[in-house]
Image: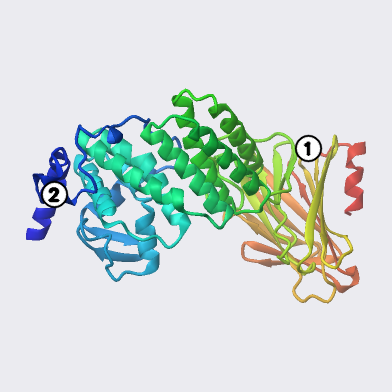
Amino acid sequence: MTDRATSLLRTVLAPVCALFPRAAGSIGQALPAAPHFNVPAIKLQGIILERPHADALPGAAPFESAMAATMYGGSFTFAGETVMALPDQVFLDSGASAAWRRELLRLDWLASFRASSTTLHHLFALRLITAWAATRPRYWKVEDLCSALLNLAIDAPAIALARSPAAVAVAQTAILMAQRQVQKCRPATGHAAFLRAAALLAAHLATGRIGPDREKLLAELSACLDHASSANGSINTALAMLAILEILADGLRRAGDPLATGLEQRIASLTQRHSILLRSDGSLAFMPTEARLPRLSPLPHASAIARESGHARLVGGKTALVVAFGESALSSPFQAELLQDGRPVLWLEARLCAGRGGTTDASLICAQGGSLLEISRDPQGQEKPSTSIFVSGDGSDIRFETAHDVDSDGACVLLHVASHARLSTTHNRNGALLTLGKSCTWQLVVRGGSVEHDGGTLRISAHNATRGLLNFALKRQHQPARKQSAGNSAAALLL
């Protein structure tokens, strides 16, 4: 109890004592520098970087506040492990796991204290920053060090500005200390290089330094974006990059820098690519609903393909089919999510052996009658069509033809539906009916195969006589039939 009371007293008085020179007492001596008004380098000369997407998710602010309150109580929970410690000792070696220490040192939790409206939480965060700077912890990965600088540059000045000039001094000193360390590091991966460039630019904006360095940092950031655009990365990584770029572009714009225009154009290009996966609520296909684009865009009204990330969107009326090619090392040629009015209703997953290794290519053909996506794989030096997908212009007819290894066991396509849907097989297991609501029913028709009903999943398997070809169609029943146009001739290739 005595230690807790002493810790609370130090939390309240530390920013006040920081106004005095180093010889003022033990609290002032513990600071990494003597941040008082006679040191111009640590005055707030930059801008407060905002997090425009921080409150975009429902329930985000209460979660952040709860996390700050838990840490204020002396309980530090990271990577599923909890350590009880005072802020002066938490950055010392406490015997915790490497994963726990890594999450602590990344300083992602600073956003939690920034989201909190409690004064004591802000003072506690400043004390943690002071302890971090005094401890000078060792970072084993460049990505973690760059993330620490990025979080300090974004959140520390915002926390400190509402408190006192001494608090601003603490934040600025920590930023400058981390900035010197990041400048010396040499990233080994493309993502680490992006984090380094973004963190240095954020620190440059937060500390108010002006000069030719800003153009150099932006050029380095653009080079990292070019490298990231040519490499296949995860959607989570891409969304995290977009969120960081949003913050930097907003900071440049508020600083009156014309270079913000170029960065905003890059953000718009990346956002447009990921809009292929967009649902009506802003979430992304194949991802949890919590994963959203930082800047929500209207639903695309035309079919599009992003070969770099391996995704395509086939649009027909109010129906859209989002397809993931898969990586070349994967055996499954595709996954697909069917959207009706922007909301997911069906999911398809191929479990086929189309050959491992090699390269994957895709082409999209759009006509008035519909859109045809052809996915090809080159596992043995000879290109072979692997999967063809067609969506009619009105969205009422969706057709699949996919090739697989004839000798493969268990080759099939799984069709998953929402929990409220009703399923029933028809025509001696050569088809099925999927009732998704009062006005939406889809009919599944399989050629050369069979359908099995297993709970909320339909398993579509090919017969041996099909010689490695699986061919089926989905037809919406609640819309009136329309006369086949010339553009629909592409569907004849599939059935």
Residue 412 is drawn in which quadrant?
Answer: bottom right
Frontmost residue, 154 versus 44:
44
Q: Is residue 400 above or below residue 222?
A: below
Instruction: Classify residue 27 as left or right of residue 318.
Output: left
The kind of residue tagged 1 is Asp
Residue shown at 47%/23% (left/top)?
256
Frontmost residue, 87 versus 214:
214
* Other residues around mark 1 within 10 Å, as few (<14) / some (14–19) / many (≥20): some
SS state under label 1: loop
SS state under label 2: helix
Frontmost residue, 84 versus 16:
16
Spot the residue most to the left.
Answer: 2
The quadrant of the picture occupied by the N terminus is bottom left
- Percent x, y for residue 82? 29, 65
Tell us which disc is closer to us: 2 or 1.
2
Residue 371 is drawn in which quadrant?
Answer: top right
First in sequence: mark 2 vs mark 1 = 2
The quadrant of the picture occupied by the C terminus is bottom right
Instruction: Classify residue 416 as left or right of residue 315.
Output: left
Q: Which mark identifies residue 394?
A: 1
The kind of residue tagged 2 is Ile
- Percent x, y for residue 215? 54, 33
From mark 2 to mark 1, how far is it between C-alphas?
71 Å
- Percent x, y for residue 19? 15, 37
Residue shown at 88%/47% (left/top)?
491
Residue denoted by label 2: 27
Residue 81 is drawn in which quadrant?
Answer: bottom left
